[in-house]
Image: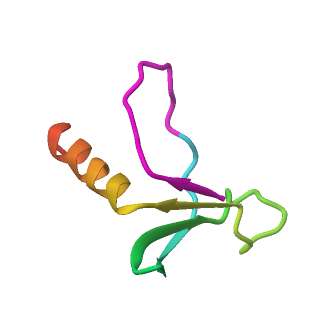
Amino acid sequence: MALINKMERISRNSKVHAEVETSYNVVIKNGKKYVQLNTYGSRERKQKGEVSQTIQLSEEAINKLQEIIKNEDY
């Protein structure tokens, strides 16, 4: 599991990965909200339907992601 508070842009050779199923929920701790994303792995995964990765985004990270999306013209 990972909690993301900050993001910065880097130059890196990246590729588009295989599509996976994803769910989300909102977690509240000490009055702060976090968006949690759960991924379930590729279709070829042996243990289907089991969470393979969990990422939590703080309010700061969500704001940064919205800024990235706006500035990259999505």
Q: Is residue 56 above or below residue 48?
A: above
In the image, the segment drawn in magenta is 1-16
- 50 relative position to 61: left or right: right
Residue 38, position as x, y percentages in the image? 58, 67
Residue 73: quarter of image: top left
Residue 32, position as x, y percentages in the image? 40, 74
Residue 9: quarter of image: top left
Q: Write the residue at 56% across / 41% down.
A: 17
Residue 74, position as x, y percentages in the image? 20, 46
Q: Is residue 6 above or below residue 49?
A: above
Q: Write the residue at 82% across / 68% down.
A: 47
Quarter holding the N terminus is: bottom right
Q: Nearer the viewer, residue 1 or 16?
A: 1
Q: Nearer the viewer, residue 38 or 33?
A: 33
Residue 69, position as x, y percentages in the image? 23, 46
- 20 relative position to 26: left or right: right
